[in-house]
Amino acid sequence: MKLYITRIASLWAMAVGVMLCGGASRVAAQNNSLYGAPQQRAPMTLADASWTYQMPAEPKTANINDIVKVTVSVKSSMTSEGKIDRKKQGYGKLKLSKWIKFYGMDLGADGQPNGAPEVRGEVDNKLQANGNLVTADKMSFVISCRIADKRPNGNCVLEGTWSVRDNEENWEYSLSGEIRPEDIKPDNSVISDTIADLKIIKREAGHVRDSYRRGWALEWLDKWQPF
């Protein structure tokens, strides 16, 4: 009797197992069927995956008379070397062997009683010069400019001036150029490297400028270099 009950329980367990396995296989087959409708999934973007993502700022619309802050950073450097070594020598000898003389109304040969005049000369010229020039310039400041005009292609023309006066010291800056609207940042700022036809004028006046300013005579000599 116990053996019979044990066989019935085993058969029942096997039947239940077969039912479960068959159902799972049918479900898997249905899910993996080639004839089933494919599942559509939208492509994942950075906005869906990142918690710190921020939408990019919209392009800035530039209008005439808008104020744009320009950061000027201009650097230049030059290195030049030169060497000259020149030597010139010359020798000359001149002798007047015959000459003419008036004898009354007649013209005849001069006897040259004191001997024939003679000239001798030597020239020795030597020039040696070495030159070495190293220059470095740097200009950095911030200036606010106004959009004075817009080109047919949308480019903006910038113009701005800046003047500071402290007692007898005076500094003046002026800037002009052309820039693309997309180069203007959302905070209305640009850098000088993106400005085309950039023109910067800087003027100084006062005691500091007078301390190293050249006089008119020295300036004329440096320009024409007569010596």
Image (spheres, rainbow, N blue to C red):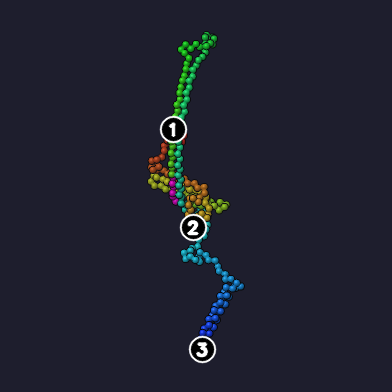
For image coordinates 41% across by 40% down, the residue present is 213
Residue at mark 1 to residue at mark 3: CA–CA distance: 127 Å
- Magenta segment: 137-144
Q: Tell me which numbered mark, 1 or 2, is placed earlier along the sequence.
A: 1
State the CA–CA distance, disc 1 to disc 2.
60 Å
Disc 2 element: loop
Q: From the image, tell me which residue sits under label 3.
A: 4
Pointer 2 residue: 186
Residue at the spot 43% in from the left edge and 36% down from the top edge: 130
Q: Main secondary structure of the magenta part?
A: strand
Q: Which mark is residue 163?
A: none
Q: Position of residue 214 (x, y in %)?
A: 41, 38
* Amino acid beneath label 2: Pro
In the rendered view, would you say 83 is above or below 20?
above
Tag 2 or tag 3, which sits nearer the N-term? Answer: 3
Residue lying at 51% horizontally and 89% vertically, measured from the top left: 4
